[in-house]
Image: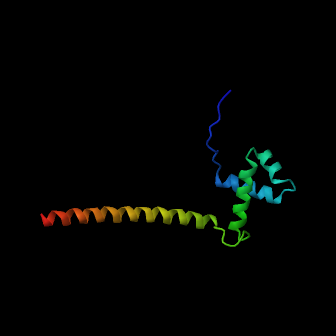
Amino acid sequence: MSKQSNRSKRYTSEFKRDAVELALSSEKTVTEVARDLGVSAEGLRGWVKQARIDRGQGPAGALTTAERDELVRLRRQVRELEQTVEVLGKATAFFANRRTK
């Protein structure tokens, strides 16, 4: 008997896209489609929800996949810039301290 990892499985974007289309076009429930595909029903529900948002059918203020990706990128960039400013501040203080001695 093999132990399963606690990490979730990773599916390709093509698989997710096809699974969502199947869930939306099928007369089956999302749970039934998920069972047929061997994926988590909650995972498939999340994919369907995000696909609707990406198509402009989601609730007001919901972020599309592209917007989420951009937000992650911008947050990373802000973090890097904050670190740069911190290093430059410390360097400035160091060199200012050396000049006064």
- Note whether 57 is above or below 80 in the view shown: below
- Note whether 37 is above or below 98 in the view shown: above
Left or right, residue 32 beside residue 64: right
Left or right, residue 72 beside residue 97: right
Q: Residue furthest top?
A: 1
- The quadrant of the image that shows the N terminus is top right
Residue 77 image position (x, y, % from top left):
45, 64
| Image point (70%, 67%), residue name | 53
| Image point (86%, 53%), residue name | 28
| Image point (66%, 72%), residue name | 61
Q: Residue furthest right?
A: 27
Left or right, residue 100 beside residue 23: left
- The quadrant of the image that shows the C terminus is bottom left
- Note whether 10 is above or below 58 in the view shown: above
Residue 50 image position (x, y, % from top left):
69, 62
| Closer to us: 67 or 86 | 86
Q: Residue furthest bottom?
A: 60
